[in-house]
Image (cartoon, helix red, strand yellow):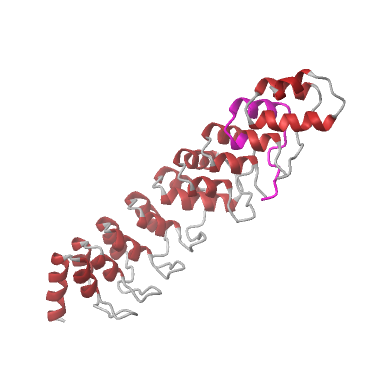
Amino acid sequence: MLLEKGAKLKPKDKNYDNFQLLVAAKYRNDTVVKILLKKGAELEFKDDYDRTPLSWAAGNGHETVVKILLGNGAELDPKDELNRTPLSWAAENGHETVVKMLLEKGAKPLFGDKHGYTPLSRAESKGHQAVVQVFLEKGANLKSKDKKYDNALLLVAAKYGKDTVVKILLKKGAELEFKDYYDRTPLSWAAVNRHEPVVKMLLEKGAELDSKDKQSRTPLSWAAEKGHEPVVKMLLEKGAELDSKDKQGRTPLSWAAENGHFPVVKMLLEKGALLFTEKYGYTPLSWATEEGHQAVKMLLQRYKKLS
């Protein structure tokens, strides 16, 4: 009611119209937005959080209002007090269509906020795969010279097993060894998530086999823990280090044994993996015993006798 009343009045208080525009954009009242813009309300007026009408409309997924504001020339990437843009808010909240609209208009996908998150990483952290896919498709199709963006996209594409996008980004020159916050590379993420075609592609391009993340874990360590037999086999055939130790002193064999992955344990043992005692006194055998993996336990006992 207040919005409609404000829209019909002809007050001389410009700030009142500006504030009303913020509220109308936030609550998807496109009729009031149109009226207020005709009356001269400021597109870039900011509230106490430094958010503009476009920021609120994008964050709340109000497609019609976003279209109106963009059509009237709203600034694409205004930053609020958290250094976040409309694209950042739309991405985090999973508003796929709004994200598409903003990217098509040229919104910058790499703006980092005060916490170091980009719109892409915001979408990914919330599990909005459809939005992540929009970023991937847009990035793969752009003839962008922004290497940093291509590198970030390669990490995400490898993580989600988007082999076509990975191929395109590699052709564009994205870095094979680019690392994220956790110091994981595209190969590491592909190995974690069982994306065999992506692992194969990255290995053929010469990805480093034994790159270590912040926990000193390698792609083989992650693949062994998850029980991804084909990925483990590929990494071993390329010469991945069998007994690489992480910060806990654990090897790929240790992780596979704890999780009861019999085929992977067998493969590692056949390749000559050693039965190390770890930092806190555990061994692959003690892990298998504690977790109740009888078949793995018996296999390890047999190899222990042989050694």
Compared with 88, 231 (above or below) is below
In this rendered view, identify the residue nearer to me: 157 or 141: 157
Q: Is residue 63 left or right of residue 6?
A: left
How far from the left and from the top, in percent, is residue 293? 17, 65
Q: Is residue 62 left or right of residue 12?
A: left
Residue 77 colored in magenta in the image: yes
- State the image quarter where residue 103 is shown: top right
How far from the left and from the top, in percent, is residue 141? 53, 39
Magenta-drawn segment? 58-82
Q: Residue furthest right?
A: 12
How far from the left and from the top, in percent, is residue 89? 59, 42
Q: Residue furthest top?
A: 8
Query: Measuring 22% from the left and 70% from the top, which residue is drawn there?
Result: 290
Query: Measuring 42% from the left and 60% from the top, which residue is drawn there?
Result: 206
Compared with 262, 196 (above or below) is above
How far from the left and from the top, in percent, is residue 222? 34, 62
Question: Can residue 170 be seen in the rendering of this structure?
Answer: no
Q: Residue furthest front?
A: 1
- State the image quarter where residue 302 is shown: bottom left
- State the image quarter where residue 61 is shown: top right
